[in-house]
């Protein structure tokens, strides 16, 4: 098993497709690669499933009843610009595909779908994500490939939750990272008390070589700009 497949085994995916036969085949294929696979048969259910489960990846058809794939993505992207989204489409004209990119969709796969084209698409978007570096300052960066923080090219020891918080802070760098978002993405299924959050932030600040986290009273935190 290569590094990418090992990474995928820790991730979750939501499959949104109205044709039962296609969706079942997709889900069965995805179960081989991902820790958990959620499914929905239309954009409305897909959005609620996304909101409830917060998957790492969404794979969605476009033409669906109740709410189509583009409408679903528009709803998701109002607050979430970081979740990877792959769209399945039967259309190949450039103008149409450009409109998908403008929706902050990471990749599209042309129908008819095959196992090979599906995995090629997943590989492309995740390898791009894994090769990224999050640059906090001239001397401090986070390597997404090995999920490690470096200061002056030396490793900074962090816990798993510390790393998840820094990535989330960066992804929300133009917004306030609210208490509710932190609870949803970092504490996940557990309840977060304010005292636990303050202790977590205090300990993380102690581990960081420079100040990155700014308090926003009564609301949350922001990433310090350099």
Image (cartoon, rainbow, N blue to C red):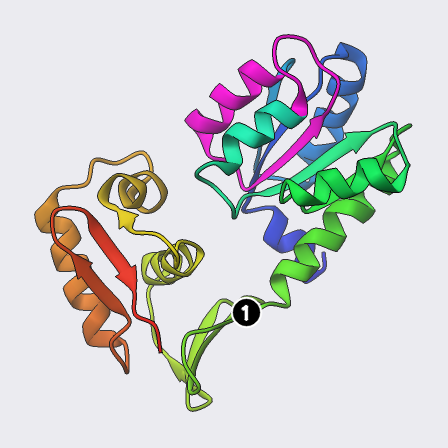
The picture places residue 67, in percent across and down from the top left corner, at 61, 14
Is 16 placed above or below 194 here?
above
Query: Camera-side residue: 120 or 177?
Result: 177
Q: Residue at x 80, y 13 (%)?
A: 21
Is 60 placed above or below 153 here?
above
Taking 145 as reference, is 178 left or right? left
Q: How many numbered tags mark residues here?
A: 1
The picture places residue 129, in percent across and down from the top left corner, at 62, 59
Instruction: Kindly give the residue lying farthest to the front in the view shown.
Output: 95
For label 1, the residue is 146
Dividing the picture into quarters, in which one does residue 89 lie? top right
Q: Residue at x 52, y 37 (%)?
A: 77
Q: Quick one: SS at disc 1?
A: loop
The picture places residue 42, in percent across and down from the top left corner, at 63, 14
Query: Camera-side residue: 89 or 14?
Result: 89
Q: Quadrant of the C terminus?
A: bottom left
Whether residue 101 appears in magenta in the rendering, the answer is: no
Q: Quadrant of the N terminus?
A: bottom right
Is 182 placed above or below 67 here?
below
Taking 147 as reference, is 6 left or right? right
The residues colored magenta run 43-69
Query: Camera-side residue: 132 or 2?
Result: 132
Say whether residue 189 is visible. Answer: yes
Instruction: Kindly give the residue lying farthest to the bottom in the view shown.
Output: 152
Query: Camera-side residue: 34 or 128?
Result: 128
Q: Residue at x 21, y 71 (%)?
A: 205
Taking 52 as reference, is 29 left or right? right
The picture places residue 111, in percent across and down from the top left corner, at 88, 29
Q: Residue at x 34, y 57 (%)?
A: 165
């Amino acid at each position: 098993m290569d590094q990418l497949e090992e990474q995928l085994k820790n991730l979750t995916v939501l499959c949104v497709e109205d044709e039962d036969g296609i969706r079942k085949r997709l889900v069965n294929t995805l179960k081989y690669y991902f820790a958990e696979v959620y499914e929905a048969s239309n954009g409305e259910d897909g959005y609620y499933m996304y909101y409830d489960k917060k998957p790492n990846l969404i794979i969605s058809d476009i033409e669906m009843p109740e709410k189509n794939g583009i409408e679903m993505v528009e709803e998701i992207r109002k607050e979430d610009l970081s979740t990877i989204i792959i769209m399945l489409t039967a259309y190949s004209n450039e103008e149409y595909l450009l409109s998908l990119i403008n929706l902050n969709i990471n990749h599209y796969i042309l129908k008819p779908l095959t196992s090979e084209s599906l995995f090629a698409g997943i590989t492309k978007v995740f390898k791009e994500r894994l090769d990224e570096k999050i640059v906090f300052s001239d001397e401090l960066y986070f390597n997404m490939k090995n999920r490690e923080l470096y200061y002056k090219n030396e490793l900074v020891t962090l816990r798993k939750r510390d790393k998840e918080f820094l990535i989330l802070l960066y992804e929300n760098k133009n917004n306030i990272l609210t208490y509710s978002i932190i609870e949803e993405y970092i504490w996940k299924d557990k309840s977060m008390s304010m005292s636990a959050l303050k202790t977590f932030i205090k300990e993380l600040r102690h581990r960081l070589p420079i100040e990155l986290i700014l308090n926003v009273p009564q609301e949350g935190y922001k990433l310090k700009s350099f």
